[in-house]
Amino acid sequence: MATKRKLFEEVGADTAKPVVTTGVIDAGRGGARLAIRGWLFVLFALVFAMILVGGATRLTDSGLSITEWRPFTGALPPLDAAAWAAEFEKYQEIDEFRLQNSWMTLADFKLIYWWEWGHRQLGRVIGAVWALGFLWFLLRRQIPAGWTPRLLFIGVLGGAQGAIGWWMVSSGVTSGEATTDVVSTRLATHLGLAFVILGFITWYALSLGRPERDLIQARRAKEAKLFTLGTVLMYFAMAQILIGALVAGIDAGRTYTDWPLMAGRFFPPQAFVFEPMWKNFIENPGLVQFIHRMTGYALFAFAIYVWLAGRRSAHPRTQFAFHAVFAAICLQVVLGIVTVLYEAALPLALMHQGLAVLCWVLILRARHLSLYPVATSLRGAST
């Protein structure tokens, strides 16, 4: 029953204060943006480790040690002497053993087996972390509106990566075809997709680090020229990464170990010895390494142009992002030269591959800030 109010009741004595509405952009199912971002960072770290372990597996010629693809039962390694003998017998049937590693004993085989087994196990761990995290946020209805397809897409790419990995390995598991390595174009596809997955994870993590309304407002100040340059640099870097994978696939980095010349010449000798001629561009060690070098020089020159444009950004954080990109690319050029001079020694080659990841991520970050610049006050504080 309602109570009578006094005629001269003090206004506001017990009146509840109105709730201030902050806007509708993030209203509704805002989701656990920071928690999902943390989960993406974990996935990023795992994929980065996967790239390095994959590189070590390739450099130690371990990738063909497991000759079958068993997504579920293959998680268990050989557990007794009979199982180890059976795995070794399977390896002895392929061309790599008969033509290149016939000297191996069971103890030698175990060394390369563990590299490939670890590589595949890490892939299973990544799949499990993605699936568990995605289902956790989905079932708890914590995924922000519009983000479910994006997070699902990462899982689809991961599943495709597993299939492509076996497609790559199967090209080297041959008998009677005189094949001792995987097809280099398949290796490039496998590595390229790993960088694509890292790229989407990075972009999503950067976007989730800011409220949706902030991104929408920031896009109005988009620096179109810088964004275009960042996009071109991103694709240019991806092309160089793929060419680098071709170099790794045929061990071209260990063929010519002088710099700046190749066997004392600008253009390597016997660059077109294969028929048909197009095969030289993906299988001739001298020509493939030459292309990798020239592309690296061109990428470095374009990076200078992008950096000079980035310095003129109106936003300090965007400027700094392009400074970081240029510094990383400079370091990568130097490390690439040192890697050649030391015949792609395992530690240097892995550092070169790891630094490629850093360059890739920094380019994406600079591109993201060009699209969504962070406004700052005159004193440099973010607004």
Image (cartoon, rainbow, N blue to C red):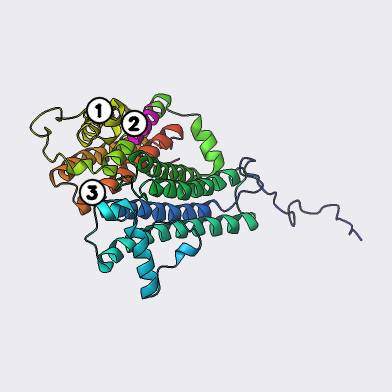
| Percent x, y of residue 39 | 49, 55
Q: In which quarter of the image is residue 109?
A: bottom left
Residue drawn at (40%, 73%), measured in percent from left and top? Answer: 79
Task: Give above or below for 188 relative to 108.
Answer: above
Residue drawn at (24%, 58%), measured in percent from left and top? Answer: 102
Q: Which residue lies furthest to the left in this view?
A: 264
Q: Nearer the viewer, residue 76 or 230?
A: 76
What's under tag 1, amino acid-wise?
Ala
Q: What element carries label 2?
A: helix
- Which span of residues is magenta-colored? 229-239
Confirm whether residue 254 shows in the render.
yes
Q: Contact, CB < 8 Å: mark 3 with mark 2?
A: no
Q: Residue furthest bottom?
A: 80
Find residue 280 and name its label: none
Residue, disc 3: 349
Residue, disc 1: 298
Q: Is residue 233 magenta?
A: yes
Q: How far apart are marks 2 and 1 (CA)?
A: 9 Å
Task: Give above or below for 19 relative to 114.
Answer: above
Q: Distance between the residues labelled 1 and 3?
A: 21 Å
The mark lying in front, picked from 1 and 3, is 3
- Determine the main secondary structure of the stretch shown in magenta: helix
Mark nearer the N terminus (1 vs 3): 1
What's under tag 3, amino acid-wise?
Ala
Q: Residues within 10 Å of mark 1 (few under 14, many from 20)?
A: few
Confirm whether residue 314 shows in the render.
no
Residue, disc 2: 236
| Percent x, y of residue 115 | 32, 60
Q: What element carries label 3?
A: helix
Q: Contact, CB < 8 Å: mark 2 with mark 1?
A: yes
Q: Residue furthest front?
A: 176
